[in-house]
Amino acid sequence: MELLFLVLLSLHIAKTATAGDKEWCYLSQLRTQPECTVPHFWDEVNEECGKEKQSPINIVTNKVEYKEDLKPFTFEGYTTDQSSLWLIENNGHTVKVSLSGSAKIGGGGLQNKYNAIEFHFHWGTKLNKGFSPGSEHTIDGERYAMELHIVHRKESFSTTEQAVANQEGLAVLGFFIKTGAKNEKYEPLIEMLNEVGFKGSQKNMTSLPLESLIPDKKNLTRYYRYSGSLTTPNCYQAVVWTVFQEPIILSESQVENFLKLYFSKDKPLPMTDNFRPVQPLGDRIVYHSDVSVVQPPAKALLVVPTLIYILSLLFQ
């Protein structure tokens, strides 16, 4: 009932808001920003958000197609500290870390190399018992606790403005995060969240090897691939998306530290549920790097006539 109320309220707000009020926000922000524009109406903020190849999406695993050229990635500069300090900031929508661009990815079916320029997170909220999950992509309708996006820009471009004008100007690596054991490698980053509690706050921090934030390389050969967009306005459809199957593990207390951030400074509201709802897939195809994912249904069909044959022998 509460969700229905919020949806109806957002419809009312969208109809009554003036052009000058079109600041985008998440549904969870309506409590303190009733004039802001929620995800279902982001196309009023920027028309790109209403186009046909938007992200995130729900990945239906029995409909993905195997693509042979989706080989393992090559990660350059992921194993060492970056060449300069990282800038961590609360931009009013998420916690974002800006990178130097010295780390690169290649392979993985990509036609070019891409430089890592930033990463950020999406998450849900705390309930009386456990968490309400907040990943952006879903697998067969299921959402994870959080999602990490590492944004890369095609190395032939020097600015993001140039990259978003190209259909494959950006490559984003998406990693699901689920709760479990404490992840010691994340502690330096978790500790910095205290320094960027409110919108506009930022701090330099010592860089970390990017590989310390993601699963082991040997577990990164199974992933999904599709063409999509940025998941926040201006929603540019310039992203080659890779969503890995292997999740990152963080403890519940580590996840809770993200929930201590705030959307704004003057109207403190915990930054929760900062994810965009899944978008229609349309005529796009989601590919998978591992043939075994799409083979079992076919194998199962082969078993049926075999069983029939065996049974016929038994009852002769």
Image (cartoon, rainbow, N blue to C red):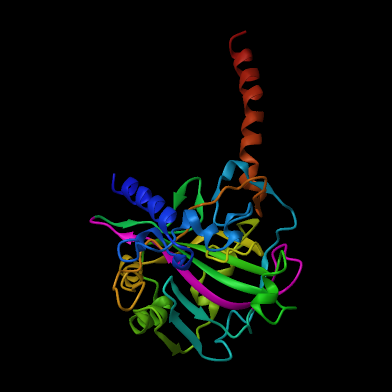
Decide if residue 199 is on the left or right side of residue 108: left
Start-end of magenta stretch? 104-128
Q: Nearer the viewer, residue 196 or 107?
A: 196
Q: Quadrant of residue 229?
A: bottom right
Residue 183: image location, x then y, percent: 40, 72
Decide if residue 78 is on the left or right side of residue 85: right
Q: Is residue 122 visible?
A: yes
Q: Nearer the viewer, residue 30 or 206?
A: 30
Residue 105 on the magenta segment: yes
Q: Quadrant of residue 70?
A: bottom right
Residue pushed farthest left? 128
Residue 124: image location, x then y, percent: 37, 60
- By secondary structure, the bulk of the magenta-drawn segment is best described as strand
Residue at the spot x=30%, y=78% of the render? 266
For the N terminus, give its image quadrant. Answer: top left
For the C terminus, give its image quadrant. Answer: top right
Q: Is residue 312 above or below residue 307?
A: above
Q: Nearer the viewer, residue 258 or 183?
A: 258
Residue at the spot x=29%, y=48% of the render? 2
Q: Is residue 118 above or below residue 148?
A: below
Decide if residue 23 is on the left or right side of residue 224: left
